[in-house]
Every structure is written in C-alpha cells, then in structure tokens.
Amino acid sequence: MSESTSPVATPVAKKARKSIDVCAPNDERVGRAARMMLSNPGYSVPQAMLAQDFTDEESKDRALQQRVRRLHAKLEKSAVAGVDADVKPVKPAAAVVTTGKDFAPHVPLALKACEFLTKSTDPFLAVQTCTDALDAAGFIKLSKRDPFAGVLKPGGSYYYTINHSTLVAFTVGQKFKGGNGFKIIGGHTDSPHLKVKPISKRSGSGCVQLGVECYGGGLWHTWFDRDLGVSGRVLVRKTDPESGKEKIEQHMIRVTKPIARVSTLCIHLQTAEERGAFKVNKEEHLSPILGTQTSLEYGTKAQLNQFDDDDWRKAQEPALLKLIASELGIETQQIANFELGLFDIQPASLGGIQNEFLNSGRLDNLATCFVAMESILEYSKSEDLANDDMISLIALFDHEEIGSQSTHGAGSPVMAEAVKRITSAFSDVVNVEAHSSAVRKSFALSVDQAHAVHPNYASKHEKSHGPKMNAGVVIKTNQNQRYSTNGVTGFIAREIGRKANIPVQEFVVRSDCPCGSTIGPIISANTGIRTVDLGMPQLSMHSCREVMGIADLTYGLSIFRSFFKNFNEIDESLEG
C-alpha cells in the first residue's frame, strides 16, 4: 500500500475513529465502511449505505449516527478532491500493508468500467451505451445506405452500427489519403446468456415460467439462484401522425427489477450422486420462474387473448408483455416482436482486499469494448491526429460466442467493407490498387479476454505460459491458428507494449487441452489484414459473474494508446 492509500491520523480521523468505536457495535456496516475509508481514502462508501434509515433498534444514539454520516461525507469528499486540510496521508502502518502494489491509480478507470458494464446488459445495450458516448464526443453517425464519399473529412470522427448490435467507429488522420492503412482494434459485444424463445409462454406446477434458450457456451450452473432482469430490443408498431402510415420502431429496454430466477433443487430431494455432480439439463432445468399462477391471472390471460388477433402475441407470456409495455409507455398491442435476454442484476463492482479486482458479468468481452471505446474517444481529441496518415478504427462485433457467421459477426463482410468504403471515400476514382495497398499497410488487434492462472487449478495452464491478473496484457499464440498471432505480429504487439512501458504476458494452451478461438483468424482470413490476438487476463470466463484485475484495464488502455500513436513507426522499421 502506498502513501496515497495509507491510514490517516488527523483530528477528523480521530473523531471518526471515536465515533466508529461507539457506533460499530450497533451498526457493523457503518463501522466497517468508515474503517475502509480511513485506511484507504480512495474507497467509496456505497450510496445505499449512506442513505439508509437507521432505527432506534439499530442505534440508541441517532445523533452519533448522523455524525458518522457527516464524517463519511467529508472523507469521501477529500478522496474525490485529493486534498483536504484535515485529512493528510502518513507513512503506511506495517499492520495494514498486505501488498506493495498500489492500485489507487487504477481505481477511476475501473469505476468507469463498472458503470459501462452495468449499463451494457446485452449486445444491443452495449452498442447503445457506446453510441451515447460517441454522440456526446461529437462523432458523426453515418448512414450505411448512403455513400461515404463527400461526407468523410481528414480529422473527422464517425461511426455506424449494424443490427444495433455491431459497432464500427473511427477517426481519420489529418494526413490520410486513399490507399493508406488502418489501425484496427476488434472485439465483440456478446456474452453467453439465456435468451427468450420466440414462444415465451411456459408454466408448470403452479408457477409462471419463461421459455429460454442457451446462447453460447456458458457455465450454466452459475446462473442458478441469481436475481435476473431482462433486456434487449423491442419492435413497436406506431402510426405516423402526418401520413397515417404504420411504421415499426426499434426500442431498447433494460428491466433491472429481479423479475426472474432459476432456482436449484433442494439438497434433500437429490441423491448422493446428483449432489456430487451438478449436471444441468439445459432444456428442463434452466426455465426461470416469473411468478405464481392465480385465478386472476388466468382471467387476465383470457381477456388479453380475447381482444388480440396477433398469433405471435398470443404465444407470449402476458405478464412479460405487460411489463414491456409499461417500461416503454405503450400498449401491449403495439408490441410486434422482441429479442430479449436475461442478465444478473447485480451491478459491476470492485473487490479484493485492496479493491484490486473488478467483479462483473460479461467481462468477456465487454471489458475490451470499454477500453476500445475509451481509446478511440481519447485519440479523436489527440494532437497526434495532426501528423497521422492512417485510420484509427474500432470494430465491435456481435455473435462471436456462436461462431461469428452472421450478417454482422466478424465472419461477415463488415470489416472488409469498412476498409473498402472508407478508402474509396478518399479516392478520386474507384481504385482496386488503393484498396489492396490499404489492406497491406493495415494491422488489427483482435482483443478478447485471456485465461489467467487459477491458483486452485494451476496445473491447467502450460507452466511457462501462465498469465496472472494485474500483471499486463496477454499475447495469445497457437500454432494451429486458433489465434492469429505469428512471429511478426507478435513482435509488433510487444513493441507497442515496450514503447508504452507496459508489461506483456504470453499465453499458449497446454498441448493436451483444446484451444478456443477468437475473431482474429476470421478477420485475417477474410480481409488479408495482419492480425495479433491479445487479451486482458481474467478468471471465471463464461460464468454469470467473472473477475479481472483493475490494473489490466489501465494496461489495456495504454496498449491501445500506444498502438494508435506508434504503430506506423514500428511498421516502417520492419523489412518486407
């Protein structure tokens, strides 16, 4: 622990400690939070705790509780401002120090990532969160159906989406010309989760349930006994007030209320063999419970179906339709279709003894999406653009977890089309040579989360290639081209890290284990663009709740910054 996160011994701190000593026995959470703030000025007390109503049963001294609250507020204010006359750091006490590593500098970015991850509950919401940030930063939204020529300008920043779940965003160097190269960061917006079936209505044993399908290769046992919300895209029928014609609008929805739950079977109804092996039948065991059936509910269903001539809506759970209509402020008859999925409503948060971990769903691969977004937003305002003769671009694809073979996955024409259309927009005539030249000058970082060594299962890693959390970005290599890294692209990635003074780790899967894959080989094969596979290390990949080191977010952002800034210089130093 560094001086910036060491305990404080000042008048304010002493008052706080005195209050804590009296208050803690009556309210454990307040005492624990106050101690955390005293030992770490960067610690943020949960707002729900500060806002809670204390009862006389919890404490006989309400005035004392209010005083602790005021002390909390003052300490929290000092942590945000970084300066306070009453609260000054002193040298760390040996009893408090658990590690020499200082994580405080990484906390602001990690907290920002928490906000991004909590909002981005599915690919649609992830892309919406990104486009909201791009709009705020002044990026111009492009129409995919209109030509880019005459719209794109040197120094400009642009984006477009495909299916509202894949995003392409880019910044044009001030010196860019048609035929110059592209610096590309690729990631994916999707994660394994439970998706609502086309016929969602399901019930059993007096319970209202929801028909769901497993998307991707999830660790499905981790979805049991979780508070689940629902989010996604809803198609809504509207009538144009001027023409009177019907139109279909796309709306995104995120219900953070715990409306669903997949409950485990109690231990008393399981055999010893079943207890020892928690086997999940994906069709029979994963249907979440929404509520209980009642006579009133049966009447409501009959009434809804009586006045609804849409066969699709009749096949949906009426309670779900009613919830969607309420959230969007529409009538249930206006709902034309939906693409919905379930998510764990627990927000992303920091964890670990020094807040050195980020705990969240969908880290694979929204952690990459977050850092990629931060890098392109930052670079779009950078002075380096003045001398940049390349395109800096991020491409965040849907459907990676199910093979990428779709109209908007990495196996689609999206990437090749982006290079071709942007190159053509800066060429006087359609020039095949300009496109080919651009491809050969380009480079892509395929970035997907990497497997950190699990201390309880260390033998699962190749002993010389075991990435650790909070130790740097990982270069992934597989000689069977499950990853796109080769000798040259791996060298370029290490040089990018070296120029940024960022630690880089290596990963190779054990020879007796299967190896997963990424969008890297797909992009390189479809476009001919040189590609390397990277990732930030994490544990619990494909679990409902995953974990990574917060320092690796900083390292990832630094790698991306260095890539946009230094790639051209590194590439020009290579022969051939």
Image: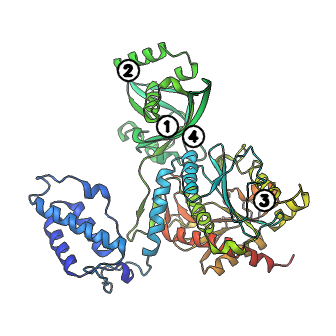
Residue 499, given in percent of the width and then of the height, sits at: 65, 81
Q: In what element is the residue under mark 4?
A: strand
Tell me the residue that label 1 is attached to. Answer: 286
Single out the residue that lies furthest toward the left.
Answer: 60
| Label annotation for residue 214 | 4
Residue 283, given in percent of the width and then of the height, sits at: 55, 34
Residue 237, given in percent of the width and then of the height, sits at: 57, 27
CA distance for labels 3 and 2: 54 Å
**Disc with the residue nearer the chain's start (1 vs 3):** 1
CA distance for labels 2 and 1: 23 Å
| Label annotation for residue 403 | none
- Whether 10 is drawn above or below 443: the answer is below
> Mark 4: which amino acid?
Cys
The quarter of the image holding the N terminus is bottom left
CA distance for labels 4 and 3: 29 Å
Tell me the residue that label 2 is attached to. Answer: 297
Tell me the residue that label 3 is attached to. Answer: 524
The nearer-to-camera label among 2 and 4 is 2
> Mark 1: which amino acid?
Leu
Single out the residue that lies furthest toward the top.
Answer: 306
